[in-house]
Image (cartoon, helix red, strand yellow):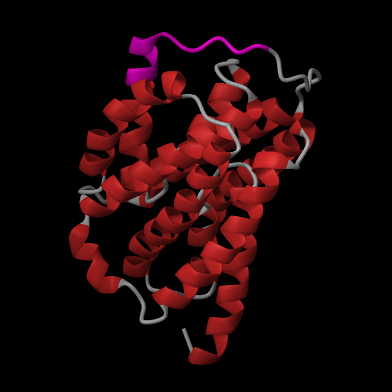
Amino acid sequence: MTPELIPFLATAIFVVALLYAGVGHGGASGYLAMMALFGLPPEMLKPTALLLNIVVAGVGTYLYYRAGQFSWRVFWPFVITSIPASFLGGYFNLPPEYYRPALGLVLLFAAWRLFARKDQRDDQPVPPPIGVAMLIGAVLGFASGLIGVGGGIFLSPLMILLGWARVRQVSGIAALFILVNSISGLLGHLSSLQYLPDYAPLLAGVALVGGSLGALCGSRHLPVATILKAMSFLLVLAGGKMFLL
């Protein structure tokens, strides 16, 4: 990528961080799409996306927790198995033709289910059984390390559709889930850090600003119905990317 395009990429990263942080996501799927469109080498995509995920999910975790939009009871069974699974997934590099179509279909189905919800009330949630949450955490953790995302893009719609937490709580839980899995996935693929671009600090800085603004709005101000529609839109973008890139 030529130096002249770096400001445009930075602007795209800012917008992605702003949108994704509003629903508690780190934005890795969006970063991967933007960086691929701007022509970054494939070996740079995964470590850079995880780095930006850590920055945005970190500030999101703080802001959602400060706003009281978090539940340790729901969170810990997922993360206790997702961390080692994400570390393991970071070791592998599967050919994209094996996982992209399947993941794309899953994401598009989740987007449709969220968008088609007629009941937008934030009813009393029922936490998942601990064993079920641990199993799901392991599967999502491995997938997040394998693909280079934090896993929240899968966890959030699942929790909402099954009524395991309130919508704003889901965003807070997803933010910390993404943070720990992104760190674990990056540690599982430490050799890839040598491929971070020279302008990675710039991208991290704009992601921090965009993520802070998005998380601040999502944790306190956005209506629940708006959060669900925004999440549906982001799932469509992420799912469509799996077929186009």
Q: Is residue 106 left or right of residue 87?
A: right
x 70%, y 40%: residue: 220
The image quarter containing residue 199 is: bottom left
Q: Is residue 99 magenta?
A: no
Q: Residue at x 47, y 49 (%)?
A: 57
x then y, percent, for residue 191? 18, 63
Q: How many marks?
A: 0
Percent position of residue 123, x then y: 70, 14
Residue 132 position, x and y percent, is: 38, 13
Q: Is residue 106 visible?
A: no
In the image: residue 180, left or right of residue 11? left
Q: Quadrant of residue 213?
A: bottom right
Indicate the position of residue 157 as horizontal and vertical percent values: 58, 29
Residue at point 49% right, 43% down? Answer: 61
| Residue 157, above or below 234 | above
Above or below, 168 against 40 in this view is above
Q: Name the residue: 49% across, 24% down.
A: 71
| Segment tinted magenta in the rendering | 124-134
**Would residue 131 be counted in the magenta stretch?**
yes
